[in-house]
Image: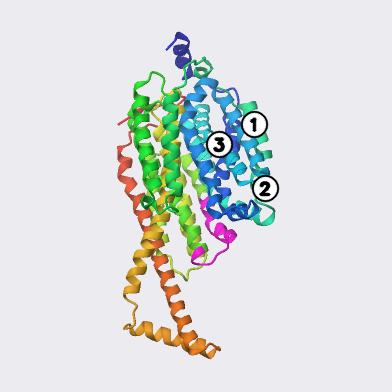
Amino acid sequence: MSSGDHTAVAGNAEWVPSANPWAIAAAVMTATFMVVLDSSVANVALPHIAGNLSASTDEATWVLTSYLVSNAIMLPATGWISRRIGRKRLLMLSILLFTGASMLCGAALTMPMLIVARILQGIGGGGMQPLAQSILLESFPPVQHGKAMAVYGTGIVVAPVIGPTLGGWITDSYSWRWIFYINLPVGILAFFLVGMFVEDPPYLKVAFRGVIDAVGFGLMALWLGSLQLVLDKGQEADWFEAVWIRWTLAISVIAFLGFILRELTVPEPIVQLHVLLNRNFTVGTLVTGVYGFVLYASTALLPLFLQTLLGYPALDSGLAVSPRGFGSIVSMIVAGALASRIDGRWLLMFGFFVFGASTLMLSHLNLGIGMGSVVVPNILNGFAGGFVFVPLTTMAMGRLQRQEIGNAAGIYNLVRNIGGSVGIATATALLVRRGQVHQNYLAGNVGVTDPAANAAAAGLASTLHAAGADSVTAHQMALGALYRSLQQQASLMAYVDGFRLLGYLALLCIPFILFFQRVRKPSGRSISVEE
């Protein structure tokens, strides 16, 4: 490290941004909220996109896959790029690229054009989450880190909840193209706000001339891209029954091992893995991966249940899930205020307990429930989010040097996103597999010798015959109705299994919280720690 580097790092502890931290928070979160919202807002518009661009539904899913792959590749590379060109400049370039790509998405005339634009969108949006997190942590003094992460968490947690509802409303009321065009004014506003308020800390103003680790970047892109492809397309291809899934996963594992070896041996790695030697950061990263798994899986399961089994339209299912966002906003404010007063480990235990308990409440769903039975667990689930997200982030980053935060934020956000992708893939696979198991079990107990089934079939056939159907047709229709009912019950039991598994996973996180070292309540701009 040069003498200039030493001077920058030494003076960094006393560095204070010239702008008000809350103005900086408004600037970076405007961009981040737009990006996180866009990652989920397109989901409900896929049928409209496919129909308008003359593509199949399977082809339309590449609109999501292409974005997720490029987004995942950019996340861990953000730290290196920001050291090379500066964090502020990278954020402004990312906003420009994302906003321009959004305009291309809205103007796309063919599916390949839309997919290319979504790749560019993912590249532009991939770095914004870790950039926003590191900028907030360095702009606010440690005593206000809880409030900073509450602001950050509000965008990260709330945006995916309201995304499907907003996307459904825009698509139904206007056109699917407007879910992309709406980013233009927001992106322009975010660009000017970042230019006005955000500045780089001293250590990032020292010129960094390291040569890019092209091999490491290539291995990282290969393992992340192939992994995301497997997770996103695995269920469609029947997982390991498809040869290309097995080969793609093998390539991902080999590239991952090569990436780890490369990053541990080169002088200037693109991802600095040494931050994982910090116990708090490693524990926090693992726990946030599980949190992402449970959060994204439960968020994906509930709308599916409401639409497929209860017959809710997309907008109504989104409205039933949206109270989670209100619970999250309240808890982010409360948790942010308590973070500097109460040991974060107690807040985390409370958060995961409520998170697990509210998810287990959803395992008591049935086909006769009303919207109230969904709203209450959702509010509690969202309320738990603030007590998980805020202390988890502050404790994971609490013992890192400032110059390590940018790199660590990329790893931290990547693991949470991978956990979410694995959670969604696991949830969808679980629905199919457990549904088949329950259907086989129920069918085995409903046969020609079962008096209850025979009585139900006879009663239904009699009703249909009285309505005008001949006896043969009425009997066949009755059997068909019973089979559909059996399928519904099997699917319901699969959803119950899924929510129960997710609830237990959330509760299992509580013992791991004890591995955190306590981050003492800070005073001034320094942090002290104790076992």
Whichever of labels 3 and 2 marks the residue nearer the N terminus, that label is: 3
Contact? badges 3 and 2 (CB < 8 Å): no
In front: label 2 or label 1: 2
Mark on residue 125?
Answer: 3
Instruction: Determine whether the residue tagged by mark 3 lies in a helix, strand or loop.
Output: helix
| Left or right relative to 102: residue 264 | left
Please tell me which residue is depicted at 53% across the width and 87% down the height of the picture: 469
Q: In x, y percent, where is residue 394? A: 43, 35
Mark on residue 6?
Answer: none
Please tell me which residue is depicted at 44% across the width and 10% down the height of the picture: 2
* Vertical position of residue 309 compared to residue 331: above or below: below
Mark on residue 178?
Answer: 2
Assess whether residue 322 is covered by the magenta stretch.
Answer: yes
* Vertical position of residue 422 compared to residue 393: above or below: below
Per the model, the C-alpha gap separating discs 3 and 1 is 13 Å
Q: In x, y percent, where is residue 497? A: 36, 60
Amino acid tagged 3: Gly
Q: In x, y percent, where is residue 412? A: 42, 35
Residue that badge 1 annotates:
191
Residue 411 in sight from this viewpoint: yes
Q: Quadrant of the C terminus?
A: top left
Whichever of labels 2 and 1 marks the residue nearer the N terminus, that label is: 2
- Magenta stretch: give its range: 308-327
